[in-house]
């Protein structure tokens, strides 16, 4: 045991506020929770990549949380777009409860093409290629969380190199498109609700 670190004590509390208010995360003020969760995962991944850039000899094991955080960002954005996009398009469907990015993307893309029929297919194709790559490496969101799968086989078999600078740059482009789509749908949905409210109030 590392004696430089204090030992656990009875009465320790994990989740509390304290007098050093600048360290208190105010959960009740975070607003639209889906966007906040998605932005938080990506910001954390970006922070870790920056840490490695600033210290090139940084530990390789940070690749696991970095890739997982980026993947979680994509999954949350896709589910948010599916949920809000279906509401905008008057579809009763909600987002699926699974973690398969490729299947989520197919639903998401259909919605984006309906909301913005004149949008760039090339940009959507670029996102789709990257999501398929993610799905091949980590189909169910476990490969970067556990060293083995449920059958005891290695989660990431074979030697593999992941350039984290490149990963963060590609994720910035994917994130920009998904963030923009999420914001746009949210604006359209709010406008739709306002129109519906005005219509109801007029009768």
Image (cartoon, rainbow, N blue to C red):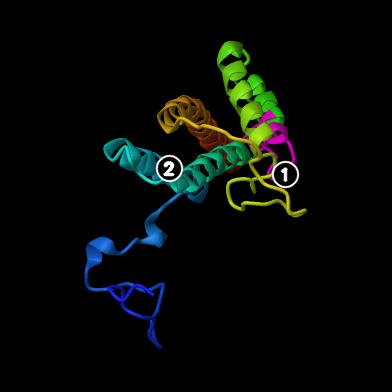
Q: Quadrant of the N terminus?
A: bottom left
> Quick one: label 1 or label 2, which is nearer the N terminus?
2
In the image, is residue 178 part of the stretch drawn in magenta? no
Judge left or right: residue 103 versus residue 165.
right
- Residue at left offset 73%, top offset 34%: 103
Horizontal and vertical percent position of residue 29 = 38, 57
Q: Is residue 83 above or below residue 13?
A: above
Neighbourhood count class around disc 2 (C-alpha, 10 Å): few under 14, some 14–19, many 20 upward: many
Query: Where is mark 2, residue-wise?
Result: 45
Q: Is residue 203 visible?
A: no
Horizontal and vertical percent position of residue 31 = 43, 51
Instruction: Tell me where the magenta segment starts and ends, as one range.
Output: 85-105
Count of numbered badges drawn on the protein = 2
Query: Where is mark 1, residue-wise?
Result: 96
Horizontal and vertical percent position of residue 119 = 57, 14
Furthest residue in direction right, as rendered: 151
In the image, is residue 94 part of the stretch drawn in magenta? yes
- Dividing the picture into quarters, in which one does residue 189 lie? top right
* Mark pair 1, 2: CA separation: 25 Å
């Amino acid at each position: 045991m590392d004696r430089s670190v204090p030992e656990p004590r009875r009465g320790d509390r994990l989740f509390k506020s304290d007098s050093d208010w600048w360290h208190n995360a105010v959960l009740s003020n975070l607003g639209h929770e889906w966007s906040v969760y998605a932005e938080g995962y990506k910001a954390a991944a970006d922070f870790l990549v920056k840490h490695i850039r600033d210290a090139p000899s940084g530990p390789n094991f940070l690749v696991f949380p970095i890739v997982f955080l980026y993947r979680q960002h994509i999954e949350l954005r896709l589910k948010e777009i599916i949920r809000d996009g279906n509401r905008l398009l008057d579809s009763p469907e909600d987002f699926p409860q699974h973690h398969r990015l490729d299947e989520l993307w197919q639903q998401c893309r259909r919605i984006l093409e309906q909301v913005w029929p004149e949008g760039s297919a090339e940009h959507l194709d670029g996102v789709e290629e990257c999501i398929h790559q993610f799905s091949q490496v980590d189909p169910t969101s476990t490969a970067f969380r556990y060293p083995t799968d449920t059958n005891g086989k290695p989660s990431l078999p074979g030697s593999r190199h992941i350039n984290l600078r490149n990963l963060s740059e590609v994720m910035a482009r994917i994130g920009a498109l998904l963030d923009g789509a999420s914001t746009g749908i949210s604006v359209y949905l709010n406008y739709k609700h306002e129109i519906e409210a005005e219509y109801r109030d007029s009768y």
